[in-house]
Image (cartoon, rainbow, N blue to C red):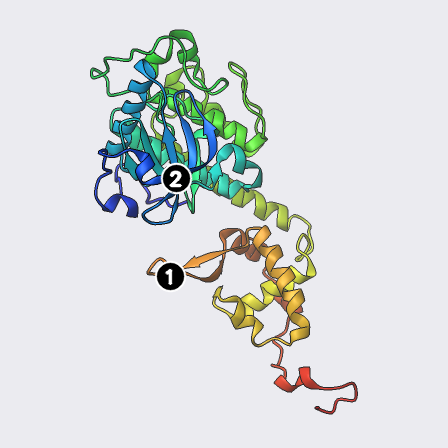
């Protein structure tokens, strides 16, 4: 998580750098609907093909009228104004439809495969997106795992169908009663209705979202969520009944997430070093690959650079170890200065393991490179 990514600065994404969406044509002229991705309160989202570029997009269409159509138009107007890398962007729009980037999935779907570091990153990015919403004087009012999407390496807040306009500008439609996702609505919303929602209500809903992604269980209204110990104080503060006891801004929450990240690193160091063998917890193949990376690279490498200098008979074991380290999140994609993928690099988790196990390389003295002809010998050692 990047301490420098502050919500007060609202950077544009690459798709925001072009012209504004054009509202003067129907979606049927430009997009081909494929399959439905889901239906919300006032619209349905489809996977669609952009006939101009051949790219897949998400197409959101409203077939409603009256109040629901006005809400949809408010959503479109809001997204046109909110330009932030952690808020879903509009690509094209019309009177009752708009398109957006096609997501990999939402937090409901993706949460089971995330490790704690990835959960911290997802929540931090969602918080930065919500901070931009609040800076603009708006309240989301329906923060939930369904409405936080992953697009490539970024997480975005989506579905602004219940968004509240800045105080003093709202007219129609008036929100009566509590509207939102059950289990994620703040106590003050349940008691007074959605028209009373503030940015504190979004904080509560994001706290309930954290409870879900750390337990796999959807929260129940008015029940304190039971989460893993490392998340307890954070979630308790986010979901406090009294609004003045919650984090008072999303930036404050991001700082608290950095503390959770530090606690997580400290916990893992303790687990690895408390009476364990230096290589316990990693398979022999994984330890071998770690040694090669440390001895033969500067911690940033391309797979083929190591494979090319290795006898063929050892490459299968190397690949097994490499996959194991990726699954442990010891390796991540490396991006060069121009934003292009370039090999792998060790993660903070891997570096923490190295700090806890400084002597593991003693079992791996530097080896002499083997002659290339070794792979082309028969059983009596005579080259063919």
- The residue lying at 58 percent from left, 30 percent from top is 215
Numbered disc 1: secondary structure? loop
| C-alpha distance separating marks 1 and 2 | 36 Å
Numbered disc 2: secondary structure? strand
- The residue lying at 69 percent from left, 55 percent from top is 277
Q: Is residue 229 left or right of residue 162?
A: right
How dense is the environment of label 2, judged by Cα within 10 Å: few (below 14), some, or many (20 and up)?
A: some
Q: Is residue 327 above or below residue 253?
A: below
| Residue 245 screen position, x and y as percent | 40, 19
Q: Quadrant of residue 373?
A: bottom right
| Residue furthest front in the image | 29
Q: Quadrant of the C terminus?
A: bottom right
Q: Is residue 257 left or right of residue 9?
A: right
Residue 87 visible to an observer of this rendering: no
Q: Is residue 371 above or below residue 194?
A: below
Q: Which mark is residue 336?
A: 1
Identify the residue under disc 2.
32
């Amino acid at each position: 998580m990047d301490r420098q990514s502050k919500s007060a600065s609202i950077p544009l994404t690459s798709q925001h750098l072009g012209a504004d969406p054009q509202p003067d044509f129907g979606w049927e002229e430009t997009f081909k609907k494929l399959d439905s991705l889901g239906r919300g309160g006032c619209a349905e989202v489809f996977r669609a093909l952009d006939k101009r570029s051949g790219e897949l997009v998400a197409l959101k269409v409203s077939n409603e009228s009256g109040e629901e159509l006005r809400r949809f138009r408010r959503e479109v107007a809001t997204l046109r104004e909110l330009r932030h890398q952690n808020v879903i962007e509009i690509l094209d729009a019309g009177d009752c439809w708009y398109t957006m980037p096609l997501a990999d999935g939402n937090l409901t779907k993706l949460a089971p495969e995330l490790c704690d570091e990835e959960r911290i990153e997802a929540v931090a990015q969602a918080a930065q997106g919500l901070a931009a919403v609040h800076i603009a004087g708006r309240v989301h009012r329906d923060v939930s795992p369904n409405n936080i999407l992953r697009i490539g390496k970024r997480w975005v807040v989506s579905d602004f169908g219940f968004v509240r306009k800045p105080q003093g500008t709202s007219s129609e439609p008036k929100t009566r009663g509590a509207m939102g996702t059950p289990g994620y609505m703040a106590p003050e919303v349940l008691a007074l209705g959605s028209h009373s929602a503030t940015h504190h209500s979004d904080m509560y809903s994001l706290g309930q979202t954290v409870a879900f992604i750390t337990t796999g269980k959807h929260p129940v209204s008015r029940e304190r969520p039971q989460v893993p110990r490392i998340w307890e104080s954070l979630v308790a503060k986010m979901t406090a009944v009294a609004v003045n006891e919650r984090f008072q801004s999303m930036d404050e929450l991001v700082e608290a997430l950095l503390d959770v990240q530090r606690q997580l690193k400290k916990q893992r160091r303790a687990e690895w070093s408390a009476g364990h063998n230096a290589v316990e917890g990693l398979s022999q193949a994984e330890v071998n690959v770690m040694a090669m990376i440390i001895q033969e690279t500067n911690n940033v490498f391309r797979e083929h650079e190591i494979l090319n200098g290795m006898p063929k008979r050892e490459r299968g074991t190397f690949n097994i170890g490499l996959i194991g380290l990726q699954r442990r999140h010891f390796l991540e994609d490396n991006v060069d200065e121009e934003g292009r993928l370039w090999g792998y690099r060790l993660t903070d988790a891997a570096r923490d393991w190295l700090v806890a196990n400084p002597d593991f390389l003693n079992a791996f003295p530097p080896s002499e490179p083997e002659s290339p002809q070794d792979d082309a010998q028969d059983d009596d050692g005579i080259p063919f």
